[in-house]
Image (cartoon, rainbow, N blue to C red):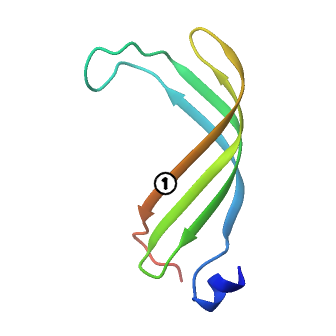
Amino acid sequence: MERRVEKDKNISDNYVAVLIAYQGGGPILGNLKTTHTIAVGYVYIIQLTNKGEFFYRLEGGVVFVQDDFDEGVGLVLAARIGWVIRKRP
């Protein structure tokens, strides 16, 4: 973290969140078979924002997953890259 502070980068965006995700309906392209899936659980999020206002985010955690055929506990891992529209005060 000291290296990020020396480079004047933000290090304050690490937090725990509740994840509720739902996937349903048909596919956008093609005729793939899909199922209705719901996931609920906790994730730990690390988000880094640089001076150019781009952010990099990594999420990981344990969730309860249920679809049309099965249910159980699983791991979730997601990565995102984005752009911050509004600057912080």
Q: Is residue 32 above or below residue 89?
A: above
Q: Amino acid at mark 1?
A: Arg
- Residue lying at the far top in this picture: please name it: 69
Q: Quadrant of the C terminus?
A: bottom right
Q: Quadrant of residue 82?
A: bottom left
Q: Is residue 21 above or below residue 2?
A: above
Question: Which residue sits at x=56%, y=10%?
Answer: 68
Q: Secondary structure at mark 1?
A: strand
Q: Is residue 28 above or below residue 57?
A: above
Q: Quadrant of the N terminus?
A: bottom right
Q: Is residue 84 above or below residue 66?
A: below
How dense is the environment of label 1, judged by Cα within 10 Å: few (below 14), some, or many (20 and up)?
A: few
Nearer-the-camera pick, 50 or 89: 50
Q: From the viewer's perspective, is 21 left or right of 43? A: left
- Residue lying at the far left in this picture: please name it: 30
- Residue lying at the far front in this picture: please name it: 3
Q: How many marks?
A: 1
Give residue 4's position: percent from left, percent from top. Answer: 63, 82
Nearer-the-camera pick, 22 or 51: 51
Question: Which residue sits at x=25%, y=19%?
Answer: 30
Question: Which residue sits at x=55%, y=22%?
Answer: 37
Q: From the viewer's perspective, is 13 left or right of 29? A: right
Give residue 11's position: percent from left, percent from top. Answer: 65, 75
Q: From the viewer's perspective, is 77 left or right of 23? A: right
Q: Quadrant of residue 8?
A: bottom right
Give residue 63's position: percent from left, percent from top. Answer: 70, 33
What residue did someone put label 1 on?
80
Q: Quadrant of residue 72?
A: top right
Question: Which residue sits at x=62%, y=50%?
Answer: 59
Give residue 43's position: percent from left, percent from top. Answer: 70, 46
